[in-house]
Image (cartoon, helix red, strand yellow):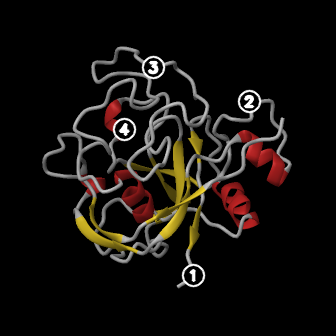
């Protein structure tokens, strides 16, 4: 069955405060210092890239349902897919800005997270509340920009090299590629097997570029010509 086409949404530019808030008890040093970033208008795919879309564009063989987010895709494969679309991976700043969609709260939609909001496995007491597996794209409500699965379901690659804090981070929304831990990239969003604290809008972690994990996928972005 032919997969649904990738749908790009326009993300309006603006300024926002990136990183952890002093009101967020789970914000760690890797999310600090909180800093203001200016984002130019760009486009982002409404959903994570799916197994079906990956197969159609790169002929990657898989036995997974076509409407599930593609996983076990390393950083370079994700970049190759994006390049076929004249697109790219989002920068970390673009990703957080798009995830927040105008909000400044811990989660994109408020201070707390419920099982109906996103795909995650455990509550903060360690009790299972989720399905324990990935779900088809669009199974949970979109954020205020119309983007689905920005938190939960699968973590997502970003373009940035991993830095353990935000000192001297770019303020223009560009990818932070110099310095840091070369060969490791920032991942965002949290996944189906995570606790709510890892689905916060400011949560960040890293993965080696060769990582092919069952809870790590990606979405794509495009520049808008000025």
Residue to which mark 3 is pinned: 130
Q: Marks 3 and 4: CB-CB under 8 Å?
A: no
Q: CA distance from mark 2 to mark 1?
A: 35 Å
Q: CA distance from mark 3 to mark 1?
A: 41 Å
The mark closer to the camera, 3 or 4, is: 3
Residue to which mark 4 is pinned: 198
Residue to which mark 2 is pinned: 65
Q: Marks 3 and 1: CB-CB under 8 Å?
A: no
Q: Marks 4 and 2: CB-CB under 8 Å?
A: no
Q: Name the element at disc 2.
A: loop
At horizontal 53% and vertical 38% (from top left) the residue drawn is 154
Q: Marks 3 and 2: CB-CB under 8 Å?
A: no
State whether residue 150 is above or below residue 160.
above
At horizontal 33% and vertical 22% (from top left) the residue drawn is 123
Q: Is residue 11 visible?
A: yes
At horizontal 72% and vertical 58% (from top left) the residue drawn is 81
Counting residues from the start of the chain, the first of labels 3 and 1 encountered is 3
Q: CA distance from mark 1 to mark 4?
A: 34 Å
């Amino acid at each position: 069955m032919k997969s649904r086409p990738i749908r790009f949404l326009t993300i309006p530019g603006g300024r926002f405060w990136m990183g952890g808030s002093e009101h967020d008890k789970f914000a760690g040093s890797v999310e600090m210092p909180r800093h203001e970033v200016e984002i130019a208008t760009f486009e982002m795919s409404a959903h994570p890239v799916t197994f079906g879309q990956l197969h159609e564009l790169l002929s990657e063989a898989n036995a997974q349902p076509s409407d599930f987010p593609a996983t076990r895709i390393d950083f370079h494969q994700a970049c190759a897919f994006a390049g076929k679309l004249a697109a790219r991976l989002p920068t970390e700043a673009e990703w957080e800005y798009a995830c927040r969609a105008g909000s400044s709260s811990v989660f994109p939609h408020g201070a707390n997270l419920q099982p109906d909001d996103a795909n995650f496995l455990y509550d903060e007491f360690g009790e299972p509340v989720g399905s324990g597996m990935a779900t088809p794209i669009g199974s949970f409500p979109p954020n205020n920009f119309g983007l689905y699965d920005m938190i939960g379901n699968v973590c997502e690659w970003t373009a940035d090299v991993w830095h353990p804090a935000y000192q001297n981070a770019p303020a223009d929304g560009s990818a932070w590629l110099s310095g840091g831990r070369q060969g490791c990239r920032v991942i965002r969003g949290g996944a189906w097997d995570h606790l709510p604290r890892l689905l916060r809008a400011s949560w960040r972690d890293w993965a080696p570029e060769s990582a092919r994990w069952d809870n790590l996928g990606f979405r794509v972005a495009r520049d808008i010509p000025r």
